[in-house]
Amino acid sequence: MLKKRLTKIAALCIASTLLLAGCSGGSTKSSPNPDSEKDSAAAAPIVLKFSDVNAEQSPAGIFCLKFKELVEERTEGRVQIENYFGGTLTANNIEGTQTGIADLSQHDVSEVTDLCAALSILEAPFLFDSEEELFKVTAPDSPIMDRLNEELSGTGVRLLATYSWGNQNLLTTSKPVYCEEDLKGMKIRVIPSQIFMETMSAMGATPSPMGWSEVVTSLITKMIDGTGMPFSNIVDTGLHEIEGYCIMTGHNPTLSGVFINEASWNKLSEDDQKILEQAGVEARQAVYESFAANEEAARAAIAEKGMVIIEKDELSFDTDAIRDSVAEKFKDDWGDIFQEIMEYLGKA
């Protein structure tokens, strides 16, 4: 009898154990682990989409590819860059980056002045005596970059980096130019931007703002007498086949700004933000070195077509007067940033 009772008790214990196991989901399933889920989320890379309307083989493409390489290598894959060339992600406007369709995009500084009027100071005439001065003012730790990003506050974007396509020089069809007097009465095409128009007026010419698509026809039909153009782009655009003179005035920088969506920026750790800034510095250096490497070939092609190059030391433009005249016209847009730059460069 005792043996039968013990057998029943054992059976009841086993049944109870199985019942409890069933209620708890069985021994083959484990409870969710919040720490494990957090670790998995933390390991997922941040992917930033970089929109560019230029071709991959362009100077802009050099910047984008180098920037991607450096960011991904130095963040050890925590941040990944997806480049979209030829306007395949967003059009040539800043709105796509403001709204977050793109995380990054590059635009000529003159194209973004409606968003932030102070940005035009980066393309002011005769403000920078060299690329080194321009790079100093637009370095990530520059107080000028801090000021410009203060001005951009609330727009949804910040200025991450800049890179240069080279300074604008004068190309004329019919006669050489050495000073303001020589430009009187001449119609010179400029980028459709107030800073470029005011610069050309201060230099003595009549500015004719127009998009690139109209330039060649306007030169051939004598609607204009010349155009501004970075030296590095003369051969690529075929202007050495049309123009007679290249005057190395270097009057306006031709600058692209790389902008990042503010929310995308805030997703990054402070360390990764610094990595992106430094990647921008090194990527723009790669663009500069590419231009420098191709300059001699461009000079040879220009000379072969008979174009005359008038060097900077042959010119007698009053560059300080031109610079200060334009600065006066933009004082409401620039506030005291112009003076800050002059002091930062030791020119005040």
Image: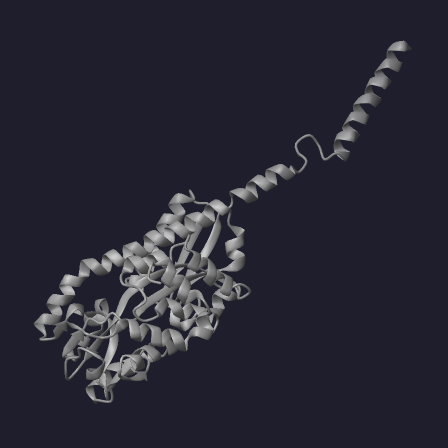
The answer to which of 257 and 168 lies nearer the viewer is 168
Render colour scheme: one colour
**Is any atom of residue 3 visible in this view?**
yes
Q: Which residue lies furthest to the top in this view?
A: 2
The answer to which of 221 and 19 lies nearer the viewer is 221
How far across and down, in percent of the image, does residue 266 sit? 53, 53
Vertical relation: 95 (above or below) 42: below
Quarter of the image where one finds residue 4: top right
Quarter of the image where one finds residue 118: bottom left
- For the point 19% across and 80% down, the residue is 172
Q: In this view, does 275 lie to the left or right of 314?
A: right
- For the point 77% across and 34% down, the residue is 23
The answer to which of 20 and 241 lies nearer the viewer is 241
How far across and down, in percent of the image, does residue 254 sit? 31, 68
The answer to which of 94 and 229 lies nearer the viewer is 229
Vertical relation: 125 (above or below) 139: below
Vertical relation: 199 (above or below) 296: below
**Is any atom of residue 103 visible in this view?**
no
Q: Residue furthest front?
A: 348
How far across and down, in percent of the image, does residue 213 sit? 30, 80
- For the point 29% across and 69% down, the residue is 126
How many numbered markers are drawn?
Answer: 0
- Where does the C terminus fall, quadrant-wise? bottom left
Q: In this view, does 48 lie to the left or right of 223?
A: right
Quarter of the image where one finds residue 57: bottom left
- Where does the N terminus fall, quadrant-wise? top right
Q: Is residue 157 left or right of residue 167?
A: right
- For the point 17% across and 73% down, the residue is 315
Q: Which residue lies furthest to the right in this view?
A: 1
